[in-house]
Image (cartoon, rainbow, N blue to C red):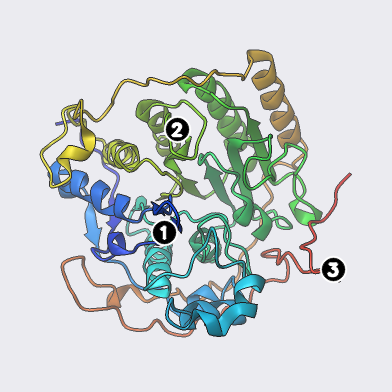
Amino acid sequence: MGSHSNKVVAYFYDSDVGNFHYGYFNLLTGAGHPMKPHRLSVTHSLVLNYGLYKKMQLYRPYRASVHDMCRFHSEEYIEFLQRVTPQNIQGFTKSLSSFNVGDDCPVFDGLFDFCSMYTGASLEGAVKLNNKCVDIAINWSGGLHHAKKTEASGFCYVNDIVIAILELLKYHPRVLYIDIDIHHGDGVQEAFYLTDRVMTVSFHKYGNFFFPGTGDMYEVGAESGRYYSLNVPLKEGIDDSNYAQVFKPVIQGVMEFYRPTAIVLQCGADSLANDRLGCFTLSTKGHGECVKFVKELNVPLLVLGGGGYTVRNVARCWTYETSLLTDESISNELPYTEYFEYFAPDFTLHPEVVTRQENVNTKQYLDLIVKHVLENLKMLDNAPSVEMHDVPPDALSLDVVEEYNDNERIHQSEEDKRVEPANEFYDGDKDQDGDTEMPEDT
């Protein structure tokens, strides 16, 4: 099999994570909610059956505590997530609306446990990178980029990405966040809108009221974070070659001007062709090309999942990307798994992309965006050097993190006594009308 990587890769997977069910979206038609945690079981099954697990350290992840989640989210919100169930939901009418829980973000059985699993895996990935135990950490269950400080949004409840980045910031002066989900990474951008210690770069569909409606190229950050938020708004139908034409020069420019010491890559698979909720036409290879490009930058890397609503394609994509991250070439012919019939009629890793979607991104439009982004990068006073003094304690001590096969749960981590600098993340403070105010920047 492929050339062997000298990179150490950790892979986090909790066998319970695929068993959660967001419930039914439409009780009249019985249509299920588009977000299906089951896609994680299907992905994992391919990763095992391709033998990729032999090339990684497998861990059953730590489960994030209320305390871990409150490093970003408000206590009232997390306490609500912990207490609300489908059975007692009538007692929470007021909270449901103030925390935006209900329609897109339903209350389902085990909601808090689900959040605790995917968030704990991202946090533990960050701790292993900080301690230089691994070069790459993978958590396909993470990447829930829409969650805000005090509310759920876009199928996301707890923002594992922000929590993992806060952990990385204990050791890393500059963290780069890259998002290739079809939706704008609004929750992460908002959290770090005012700081230069995190640069957020999001490539997404923008316009025609596409969710979440943010991510215009003029949203560039504010205060110390001005020019540290980069947005690449794309139109429907973008294909592999156009995507690479934008992705590579932008990331190359970011590396040159920002010089991050750690990278978090959100690999939402809803940017693939024929996604139930998406409108791009990327193939698994085109999507994987971005992952390969970032891996080759040789910076400590946390790789996360995100959106992706056509289960068989999500599983193909993240399995292929796991092979790229471990430097293993795998066969286009899928191995037999308990989910084999999902992949009919071709049973291949890279099915041919057949789409009726027209690509409305012109070369001129894409060149213009790249030019705009690169001009903003030039506004940075080259890489800011942030001096770090005492390194705060890790969120969880590594000696209590169990190897994957161990069914023991990890002990509650020691209290994390870190005091956040005032600027470290932007709360989106509510103004008098109750609307979240984004700093305006003309």
Task: From the top left corner, tell me how far across and down residue 57 is, in percent.
Answer: 22, 56
Q: Which mark is residue 24?
A: 1
Dots 2, 1 in contact, CB < 8 A: no
Which label's residue is closer to the chain start, 2 or 3? 2
Question: Cα distance, mark 2 to mark 1?
Answer: 34 Å
Which label's residue is closer to the chain start, 2 or 1? 1
Dots 2, 3 in contact, CB < 8 A: no
227 lies left or right of 251: right
247 lies left or right of 110: right
Query: Is label 1 or label 3 in front?
Result: 1
Element on which disc 2 rests: helix
**For mark 1, does the 10 Å Cα neighbourhood hold few (<14), some (14 to 19), or many (20 or more) residues?**
some
Q: Amino acid at mark 3?
A: Asp
Task: From the top left corner, tell me how far across and down residue 72 is, in percent.
Answer: 59, 70
Query: Is label 2 or label 3 in front?
Result: 3
Which residue is disc 2 drawn over? 290
Element on which disc 3 rests: loop
Q: Quadrant of residue 269?
A: top left
Element on which disc 1 rests: strand
Which residue is disc 3 drawn over? 433
Question: Cα distance, mark 2 to mark 3?
Answer: 41 Å
